[in-house]
Image (tube, coloured by chain):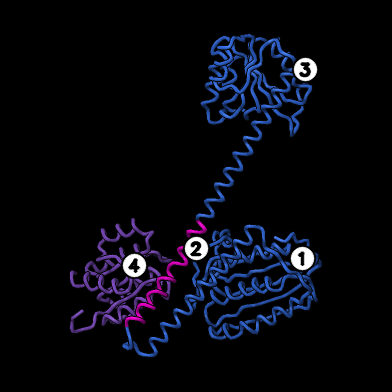
Amino acid sequence: MNKPPLPLADSQTVLCVDDTPANLDVLWRTLEPRGYRIQVAPSGEAALKLLENAPPPDLILMDVMMPGIDGYETCRRLKSGERTRDIPVLFVTARNQPEDIVQAFEAGGVDYIPKPFRQEEVCARVAAHIGIERLRRELREQNSALEELSEQKSRFVGMAAHDLRNPLISIRGFAELLLDSEDELPAAERRRLLQTIERVSGDMLGLINDMLDVTTIESGKLELSMASSSLKQLIEERLKIFENIAHRKQIALDAELGETGRRMLDGARIIQVFDNLLSNAIKFSPENTRIKISLAQDAESDLVTVADEGPGISEQEQERLFEAFEKLSARPTGGESSTGLGLAIAKKMIEGHGGSLEVYSVLGEGASFSFRLPREINHDGN
Amino acid sequence: MTETRRPRAVIADDESHIRTLMKTALTSMNCEVVAEASNGAEALDAYREYKPDLMLLDINMPVTNGEEALAGILAEFPKAFVIMLTSVSDADTVHRCLEQGAAFYIRKDTPIKEIKQLIRESWSNR
């Protein structure tokens, strides 16, 4: 019975504080066979000293009458310490007058066990209080996770509002200018203002659609409609659409598309991801550069890569790249807009397919984005 | 603005639609917009190159922000006439810019008519 308890992963530690070795021995013999790890301290001071550095136990059984500081005072000091205030303290004592009991609770104890005690009672109370404290800890953790989430949401709303505000300022301003100018503005100028209104409101619509996507993803309601499709065909169709946009910036699209056969995927979502990667590449590429688009296959998955010769992304910025509203230092080379949400969404869409989206880039040497889609999909729909 | 020569202006803002808006407003006030800049560093370069009579300078811009650009411009051209463009959230920065020597500030969500009025007033009080 005196062999040291095994440090079981799920075993709980009880610290017994008592100046009488016989009492400690009884507690040891009561709790150790039930799987608790036992620590002992022969005085209040010894207990406080032990807890300065040792990991806090799950519960403390505390004698009241001890030389030096008594159990009540020891408890009060533990309750005022940052590291020790949440450890439940149970008093075990022969002093059982009502005022003693009241004092025990006032000192911060959670329970009071009169001596002599029945072993079953000690065990039941210890188990109950460890359980309560575990639930309290879980609640605290959930609470702080929720607080963090709520802060994230506020930041998200704040950033979205900011990004929607300036385009609205412009739209209202242009409307005001057009209304006030009557016929003074030359037709070409009027047309330019109207085109800007059209473009800016299109950007706003894009941002709102992206925000709705983010909301859908975050609430776990992203549903993929999987169907058998050819990735190669899908990419070829998108390349035709992007050819003109790339051509306007003198950017060449070099495609090397291997034959990967038909596979299950959500066509609309994969198109959205591919469009995002390719339009980013075009957006951040200087004129007269090339973008390489490739489709390849290995044993388990299909791999799509879009590699540009743009400014590249530093390692620090790569860490933030896939987070919502992260706009990095590189700016669109042709005045294009960006919401800062596209890559965050793309990553989630690919993860919804059980795949992964990654970036490889060295600052100054272009960026290469790849997504890998496993051919066997165990997607859970979010 | 009643000078015989049209005042020459530079507009610095990272959002092209805001530049277009301010350019249209300034042009309608008989200003000539000689250059646009989309970040603080470009703003300083444009000021050096064009030495405009008037600059509209956004605060929240990439590379170097408007506050830093303002410091650079005033260090070289202490008499520069710079109006800061701001959003609601820039209150502290606005204050620092005015202390540095910006002529005035205009919140971007001010109606155009008032923006024009504010520019006219601060121009005639310069």
Mark 4, residues whose alpha carbon is within 10 Å: few (<14), some, or many (≥20)? many
Residue B112 visible in the displayed image: yes
Residue B90: x and y in percent read: 36, 59
Give the number of the mark in front: 3 or 4: 4
Q: Earlier in the sequence, mark 3 or mark 2?
A: 3
Residue A288: x and y in percent read: 54, 83
**Residue B115 falls within the magenta-colored stretch:** no
Q: Secondary structure at mark 4?
A: strand
Q: Secondary structure at mark 1?
A: strand
Q: Which residue is mark 2?
A: A160
Q: Residue at left 65%, top 71%?
A: A273
Q: Is residue A350 above or below residue A310?
A: above
The circle on residue A374 is 1
The foreground one among A363 and B50 is B50
Q: Earlier in the sequence, mark 3 or mark 1?
A: 3
The amino acid sitting under disc 4 is Leu
- Segment colored magenta: A155-180
Q: Which residue is mark 4?
A: B85
Give the drawing colour for chain A: blue
The circle on residue A2 is 3
C-alpha span from label 3 to label 4:
77 Å
Circles 1 and 4 in contact, beta carbons < 8 Å: no
Residue B79: x and y in percent read: 22, 69
Question: Dot 4 falls on which chain?
Answer: B
C-alpha span from label 1 to label 4:
50 Å
Circles 3 and 2 in contact, beta carbons < 8 Å: no
Q: Quadrant of residue A31?
A: top right
